[in-house]
Amino acid sequence: MKQGKKIQSSKRKIEKSLAASIPEEIREEQKILDILQKSFSGVFGSDEFELVLRNIKKAFYERDFNTVFTNSENLPVYSAAYAPRRALCYYNLLRQIPEISNLLCLKNKTIYCLGAGAGSELLGISSLINELVEQNSVKKENVNTSIVLQDYVDWNSVLIPLQETIMSEYNFSAGFVDFKHDLSNLLEIDAQIETGISKADLVTCMFVFNELFADKAKVMQFISLLTNKLQPGKLFLVTPTFSITIQYDPILLLILSYIKN
Ligand SMILES: C[S@@+](CC[C@H](N)C(=O)[O-])C[C@H]1O[C@@H](n2cnc3c(N)ncnc32)[C@H](O)[C@@H]1O
């Protein structure tokens, strides 16, 4: 019995020293994948997964974005398939931008994430917060971050279990990170979106332009709103979706030059 305990204790020590020798970002990345695995275990294991994913890809190919996102059956499968690479990408991207890490270390900040119901931004940002807390770069009492996930469809079936897993796996106490789901359409601008942008310290727009450009006239109204409502000194982060049918560069330059001025 005593021998068994000794073996267990040396095993734990070896595991601990192995974990300490793994670079911090690799540990964070593994944690991201573990959280998704836990949150979507039922989805990955479902018999329908491959079939639903094939239908999603077909609709994307046909640029039929509404079919992808307004069919509730697709949402968990979409997130399970796409959120892993996106959350890893966002965590790595955000941690390389000093302005964003600095913002996360300040008291009371709001991040408004456009078209973010699938949960990738939520996990990427939470992971960076966790890293900053573990490095003692941010004091626990300063963590309180409000993350608003704006989207035009109700992603709660995905977001609620993901939020719960994030809170428990990162040991976030209540009030540490406050998550909200803001249901609104970027192509039908309303007061909720205006307030969201004008109150935000950071606005993100990750892989959403492809969908928005389905309506070119309305997307210009949205860009104009963004440039008018984002307050001076606040941050805007955009990642364009690569598409052979849209030329982004001039539009992005236009947005960036408006915001800079
Ligand atoms: C390609 S997904 C990207 C999701 C997320 N940003 C990510 O990186 O995982 C596009 C997202 O934009 C949302 N979306 C599409 N059109 C929208 C609109 N007009 N207003 C708000 N959200 C929209 C979709 O519901 C979907 O969540």
Image: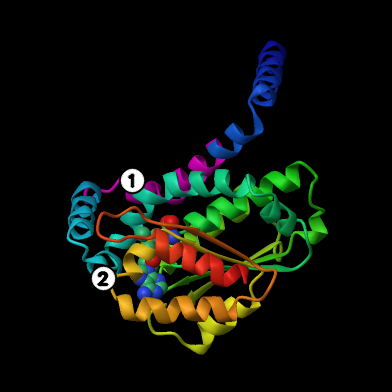
Within the image, what quadrant is residue 153 found in? bottom left
Q: How many dots with numbers?
A: 2
The front one of 205 and 252 is 252
Q: Is residue 105 magenta?
A: no
In the drawing, does residue 119 fall left or right of residue 105?
Answer: left
The answer to whether residue 154 shows anywhere in this view is no
| Residue nearest the observer in this picture, 28 or 19 | 28
Residue sitting at the far top: 3
- The residue drawn where x is 33% and y is 51% is 43
Vertical comparison of 131 with 116: above or below: above
- Labels 2 & 1 near each other (Cβ < 8 A): no
Secondary structure under the numbered disc 2 in the rendered image: helix
Identify the residue under disc 1. Answer: 44
Range of residues picked out in magenta: 30-48
Q: Mark 1 or mark 2, which is nearer the start of the sequence? A: 1
- Residue at 22% across, 68% down: 67
Residue 35: percent from left, percent from top: 51, 46
Q: Secondary structure at mark 1?
A: helix
* Secondary structure, magenta segment, majority class: helix
Mark 1 residue type: Phe
- Amino acid on which the number 2 mark rests in the picture: Asn
Q: Which residue is mark 2?
A: 66
Q: Label 1 crowding class (10 Å Cα cut-off): few <14, some 14-19, many 20+?
A: some
Quadrant of the image for the C terminus? Answer: bottom right
- Tell me, for residue 25, which label it has, or none: none
| Rendered-image quarter of ligand 1 | bottom left
Residue at 68% over, 44% down: 131
